Image: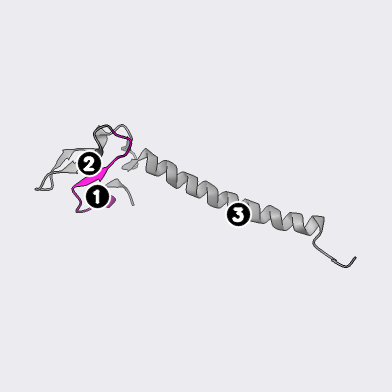
Amino acid sequence: MNLTERLGEKRILWCPFSEAGACVIKNADGESVREPNECAHYNPETDECVHVEAARAQIRIAKELSVIDKHWSARLSISVGGGDTDD
């Protein structure tokens, strides 16, 4: 879901990093008063806020690191002590 899709029927999308306070504002007729491209944090190639993109990237990285951690934890338990547990 990109910025335009999140806007939907709403009139304002707020940007906590913008002095203007909003990245998109529509009037009562649905016409844009403030366009997304007026916000320094807007990426026109993806129609998205760069902060949303960064948060999504962090989530993907965390998921990949979790997979790597599980893989190496399993391999280490096999090579270090996973086997016969009799003393």
**Could you tell me which secondary element the residue under label 2 belongs to?**
strand
Q: How is the image coloured?
A: one colour
Magenta-tinted stretch: 5-18
Which residue lies most toward the right here?
A: 87
Residue at the image position 38 percent from the left and 44 percent from the top = 52
Q: Which residue is mark 1?
A: 7
Q: Earlier in the sequence, mark 1 or mark 3?
A: 1
Real-space Cα separation, disc 1 to disc 3, in angstroms: 34 Å
* Image x and y of residue 3, in percent: 29, 46
Q: Is residue 66 left or right of residue 12?
A: right
Per the image, is 43 magenta? Answer: no
Name the kind of residue labelled 3 in the image.
Answer: Val
Q: Earlier in the sequence, mark 3 or mark 2?
A: 2
For disc 1, the neighbor class at 10 Å (few under 14, some 14 to 19, many from 20) is some
**Could you tell me which secondary element the residue under label 3 belongs to?**
helix
* Image x and y of residue 35, in percent: 21, 38
Q: Which residue is mark 3?
A: 67
Q: Is residue 54 left or right of residue 82?
A: left
Per the image, is 7 magenta? Answer: yes
Say which of 63 and 20 sits in front: 20
Q: Which residue is mark 2?
A: 24
